[in-house]
Image: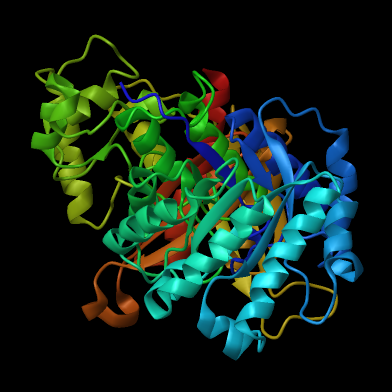
């Protein structure tokens, strides 16, 4: 067994915040810090205290947290050219963050030194050395990010190696080899890491450990990180969900299981790998971003099976179409219900409601025929589990109706007036023999209908106050029919704890939306009644 320890260094709060559409408040950053600490990452790079007041405030607030697994570090640059390290404001700001460890980046590419930094090669080396030496004299442990290392190695090998040797001689505890542009292939990263390790092992005293910081511009960040680990790196940097500047960083959630479970390298405290999916989804919620369903290991599609033969094989032996057990990373197996699904997959889902049913039960044949008939009309349940569950319960006679939508009307007026929204909806529902009517206005027809429907039901079911729509998708089923085409509407909803998706189909987009909305509310009430 490989007992190699790998330090997981998460830069969601720093490099991740540079991703398009990502913006963290101080409260968000503190919440993500607690989540990462629960997961058990070794390091959390929390930001640049000299770049903005928000990061400076974070470093004050984070001291109040009790962290059990993670250490916080501040990030900045080497001193500016023409200044001494002692007189450089950014280095002073790094010290003011009061973290035991600081990370500074410096140029490892001769091209960047002369053309971007517009400094001499020797001055850049002195900037690296004097910055690290000064921070160490102030009692800080220093990690050095060798920016553009692999590109620099290809352009001027001797200078790139000299830059990291200078950092080592100055006393850097870790030297991080950066594929800053994300354009290198794994073989290049592997060879470059070996060369770097050979070059710094001649340093007298304690040799620094190597780390890898890969960007995903070629879609190879995970592969490059693994190649670097195989070549000797003991620290891997990335962001938990992979978001970051341009195409993002190494996705740690997709990397950690490979290192820990498959390569038998310890990345997290014992037993913490099974919390990976839960914590990743929590971080996505805090970041207010949609978690990519296709992320390996933790994505909603990671262990989903649609083809009937695949589902049947999975039920016999899981390794037939799954590379690991979903529970290892805290995820779940998921059988997608569609016309391609077989009776075994349908039966497995139905057993969630009735454990006595197998694939030879007459109800399974009836459900299979019903699914195929609905899909022929444009319905699709492989992305709408909540609607499928309601369909199954109705077919099995297990469904309790919580309400009936008797009638509704939606009107739109453009442009909107100053005192009202552009869309208005009226609904009439029947609940336990009692009729209730309500009206509402909204930003659009679906919003107005949603508001009116829940307003009519909240008096009967107060839990609906916590429910909200989080995503709405429309798909034209048959484009040849132009504006007369049927549409499929998918609605994702949440109650703040869990999320579910429902579907509706009609040639009328409002009618399709109403079907999905009714299922969404019904599913929420059904879950509460169980």
Where 230 sits versus 35, above or below?
below
Q: Is residue 205 visible?
A: yes
* Quadrant where the N terminus is found in the figure: top left
The residue shown at (30%, 73%) is 485
Left or right, residue 507 beside residue 126: left
Q: Position of residue 304 (x, y in %)?
A: 28, 39
Left or right, residue 62 beside residue 113: right
The residue shown at (55%, 44%) is 207
Q: Quadrant of residue 282?
A: top right
Along the line of sight, the residue nearer the viewer: 55 or 383: 55
The residue shown at (64%, 85%) is 120
Along the line of sight, the residue nearer the viewer: 44 or 209: 209
Q: Quadrant of residue 313?
A: top left
Left or right, residue 250 beside residue 120: left
Q: Position of residue 385 (x, y in %)?
A: 37, 39
Where 67 sits versus 135, above or below?
above
Q: Position of residue 36 (x, y in %)?
A: 63, 37
Along the line of sight, the residue nearer the viewer: 227 or 406: 227
Q: Is residue 332 visible?
A: no
Q: Position of residue 376 (x, y in %)?
A: 17, 54
Left or right, residue 400 beside residue 99: left
The residue shown at (71%, 56%) is 439
């Amino acid at each position: 067994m490989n007992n190699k320890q790998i330090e997981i260094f998460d830069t969601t709060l720093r490099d991740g915040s540079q991703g398009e559409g990502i913006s963290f408040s101080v409260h968000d950053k503190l919440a993500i810090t607690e989540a990462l600490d629960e997961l058990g990452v070794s390091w959390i790079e929390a930001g640049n205290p000299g770049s903005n007041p928000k990061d400076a405030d974070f470093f004050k607030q984070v001291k109040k947290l009790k962290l059990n697994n993670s250490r916080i570090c501040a990030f900045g640059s080497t001193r500016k050219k023409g200044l001494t390290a002692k007189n450089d404001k950014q280095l002073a700001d790094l010290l003011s963050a009061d973290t035991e460890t600081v990370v500074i980046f410096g140029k490892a590419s001769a091209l960047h030194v002369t053309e971007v930094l517009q400094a001499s090669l020797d001055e850049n080396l002195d900037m690296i050395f004097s910055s690290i030496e000064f921070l160490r004299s102030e009692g800080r442990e220093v990690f050095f990010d060798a920016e553009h290392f692999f590109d620099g190695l290809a352009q001027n090998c001797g200078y790139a190696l000299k830059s990291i040797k200078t950092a080592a001689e100055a006393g850097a505890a870790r030297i991080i080899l950066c594929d800053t542009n994300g354009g290198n292939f794994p073989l290049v990263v592997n060879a470059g890491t070996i060369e770097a390790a050979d070059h710094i092992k001649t340093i007298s005293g304690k040799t620094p450990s190597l780390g890898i910081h890969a960007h995903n511009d070629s879609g190879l960040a995970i592969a490059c990180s693994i190649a670097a680990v195989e070549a000797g790196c003991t620290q891997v940097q990335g962001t938990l969900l992979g978001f970051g500047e341009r195409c993002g960083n190494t996705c740690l959630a997709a990397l950690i299981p490979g290192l820990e479970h498959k390569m038998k390298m310890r990345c997290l405290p014992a037993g913490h790998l099974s919390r990976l999916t839960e914590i990743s989804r929590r971080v996505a919620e805090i970041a207010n971003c949609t978690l990519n369903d296709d992320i390996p290991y933790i994505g909603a599609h990671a262990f989903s099976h649609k083809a009937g033969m695949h589902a049947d094989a999975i039920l016999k032996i899981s390794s037939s179409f799954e590379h690991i057990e979903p529970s290892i990373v805290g995820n779940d197996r998921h059988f997608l219900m569609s016309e391609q699904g077989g009776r075994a997959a349908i039966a497995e889902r139905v057993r969630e409601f009735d454990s006595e049913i197998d694939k030879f039960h007459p109800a399974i044949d009836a459900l299979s025929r019903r699914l195929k008939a609905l899909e022929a009309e444009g319905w699709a349940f492989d992305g709408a589990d909540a609607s499928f569950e309601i369909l199954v319960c109705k077919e099995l006679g297990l469904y309790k109706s919580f309400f009936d939508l008797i009638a509704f009307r939606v009107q739109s007026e453009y442009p909107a007036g100053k005192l009202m929204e552009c869309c208005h909806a009226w609904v009439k529902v029947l609940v336990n023999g009692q009729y209730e009517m309500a009206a509402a206005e909204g930003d659009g027809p679906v919003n107005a209908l949603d508001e009116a429907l829940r307003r009519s039901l909240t008096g009967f079911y107060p839990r609906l106050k916590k429910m909200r729509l989080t995503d709405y998708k429309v798909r034209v089923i048959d484009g040849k029919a132009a504006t007369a085409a049927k549409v499929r509407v998918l609605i994702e909803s949440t109650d703040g704890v869990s999320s579910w998706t429902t579907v509706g189909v009609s040639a009328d987009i409002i009618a399709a939306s109403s079907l999905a909305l009714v299922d969404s509310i019904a599913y929420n009430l059904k879950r509460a009644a169980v």
